[in-house]
Image (cartoon, rainbow, N blue to C red):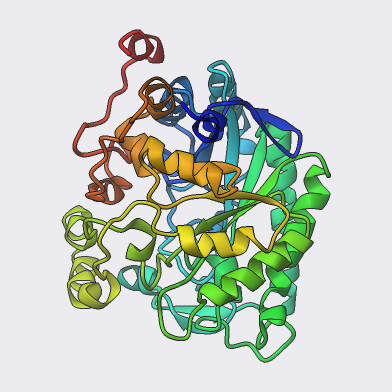
């Protein structure tokens, strides 16, 4: 094993937080929080990832307020779930791993039937495709007071997450969700200080970053996920991503995760491989939403063949411009890819589908010189988010076997 590959499996630090290696579980909404409550299955899911050798696992989509959830079965950060979160985090810590929470807000993209407002709020008035089947076809524009309140909500959520025991927080700036809606000229049509130029469109995300940093302190890791491109005409592109990253770096972020695409307009850019259109239709229970997906599917779910390291060249452009940690995600599933990422100067590697397929990937890769993940990038797992058992690999199934028994078999 050469020096670059050895680096993947050696201890590393993220703003003072010691991690046992360079592998981080990417935030993938697990679908294991019925009624917004962390379930025993969620604890088992992350504990199993931790027992497989991952350095830090990420609890996907921790909404910063109740109305920030995409649906009513998502987590939002509040005292009512303190005990469950502490138990989950303690279980992961017992396996030698750390826990990050992905801070999210849906903005104008929601099908939350418990929404306290008549409509979800985004940067501008627009169409809310996700909520169409639930009678929420539109979203309204946020006022200045709404924006100020959202910043406070992020600050409060970050303080709560630190107090519960999270080791890091990941602010979701990408994939077409609330903060990304402000960043993108496709969804942000404002005429005030929060719209127009990229500097103005970044005003809210940078305020959120500052508020989160204020809440957790200078020595607590704060990272962020961006979209390298939204993949739609009039949306964010690769050049924008470089400027966005430089602004986040200047704003004091500890690490940038270079993802891509948008769940609202072009999700396949972030996945590559098998198209998720038909699996999502099969999984959808609402007849009206099924019909909508049949109609918009061909334009929304484009085909992008899978290839290893499909975001590498664009992510390298950002690596050259920022001083913070760079966290690569996107088509890394072999030791050859892990080695190359270290050679190219990336600090950490986020893994999603490959860890769903094989939660013990870090341990397997460390002892197998020419390791290749068994994940075939069919993307069937994406459609299992609302499965009764939560997200899982459809090829190798989902197991609730105890961590001890699993560990003894590898």
Q: Is residue 251 left or right of residue 408?
A: right
Instruction: Tell me: residue 35, above or below residue 291.
Output: above
Residue 360 visible in the picture = yes
Q: Is residue 148 left or right of residue 331?
A: right
Name the quarter where the C terminus is drawn. Answer: top left
- Name the spot of residue 141 as percent of width and height, x first: 59, 81
| Closer to the camera in the image, 137 or 333 | 333
Report the residue at 72% width, 79% height from top.
199
Residue 106 visible in the picture = no
- Name the spot of residue 66 as percent of width and height, x first: 56, 54
Q: Quadrant of the rendered structure where residue 49 is?
A: top left
Question: Which residue ends up furthest to the front in the rendered image?
Answer: 2
Instruction: Tell me: residue 126, above or below residue 321.
Output: below
- Name the spot of residue 284 as percent of width and height, x first: 22, 57
Instruction: Tell me: residue 95, above or below residue 378.
Output: above
- Name the spot of residue 105 as percent of width and height, x first: 56, 60
Q: Is residue 7 left or right of residue 216?
A: left
Report the residue at 53% width, 35% height from top.
4
Question: Which residue ends up furthest to the bottom in the rendered image?
Answer: 191
Q: How many marks?
A: 0
Report the residue at 30% width, 10% height from top.
409
| Closer to the camera in the image, 234 or 285 | 234
| Closer to the camera in the image, 327 or 96 | 327
Q: Quadrant of the rendered structure where residue 149 is?
A: bottom right
């Amino acid at each position: 094993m050469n020096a670059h590959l050895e680096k993947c499996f050696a201890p590393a630090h993220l703003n003072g937080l010691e991690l046992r290696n360079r592998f981080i579980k990417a935030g993938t909404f697990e679908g294991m929080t019925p009624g917004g409550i962390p379930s025993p299955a969620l604890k088992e899911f992350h504990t199993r990832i931790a027992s497989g050798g991952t350095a830090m696992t990420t609890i996907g989509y921790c909404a910063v307020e109740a109305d920030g959830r995409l649906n009513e079965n998502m987590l939002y950060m509040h005292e009512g779930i303190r005990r469950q979160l502490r138990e989950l985090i303690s279980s992961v810590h017992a396996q030698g791993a750390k826990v990050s929470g992905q801070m999210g807000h849906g903005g104008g993209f929601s099908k939350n039937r418990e929404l306290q407002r008549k409509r979800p709020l985004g940067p501008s008035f627009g169409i809310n495709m996700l909520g169409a089947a639930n009678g929420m076809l539109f979203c309204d524009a946020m006022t200045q007071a709404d924006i100020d309140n959202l910043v406070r909500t992020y600050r409060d959520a970050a303080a709560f997450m630190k107090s519960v025991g999270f080791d890091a927080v990941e602010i979701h700036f990408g994939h077409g969700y609330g903060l990304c809606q402000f960043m993108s000229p496709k969804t942000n049509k404002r005429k005030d200080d929060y719209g127009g130029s990229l500097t103005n469109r970044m005003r809210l995300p940078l305020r959120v970053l500052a508020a989160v940093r204020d809440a957790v302190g200078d020595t607590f890791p704060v990272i962020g996920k961006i979209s390298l491109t939204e993949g739609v005409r009039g949306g964010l592109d690769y050049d924008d991503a470089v400027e966005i990253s430089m602004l986040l770096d200047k704003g004091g972020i500890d690490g940038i995760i270079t993802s891509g695409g948008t769940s609202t307009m072009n999700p396949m850019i972030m996945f590559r491989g098998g198209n998720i259109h038909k699996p999502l239709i099969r999984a959808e229970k609402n007849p009206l939403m099924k019909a909508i997906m049949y109609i918009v599917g061909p334009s929304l779910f484009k085909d992008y063949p899978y290839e290893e390291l499909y975001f590498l060249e664009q992510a390298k452009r950002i690596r050259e411009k920022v001083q913070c940690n760079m966290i690569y995600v996107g088509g890394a599933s072999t030791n050859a890819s892990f080695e190359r990422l270290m050679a190219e100067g990336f600090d950490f590697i986020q893994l999603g589908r490959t860890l769903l397929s094989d939660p013990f990937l870090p341990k397997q890769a460390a002892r197998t010189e020419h390791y290749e993940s068994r994940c075939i990038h069919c993307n069937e797992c994406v459609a299992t988010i609302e499965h009764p058992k939560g997200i899982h690999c459809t090829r190798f199934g989902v197991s609730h076997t105890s961590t001890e028994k699993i560990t003894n078999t590898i």
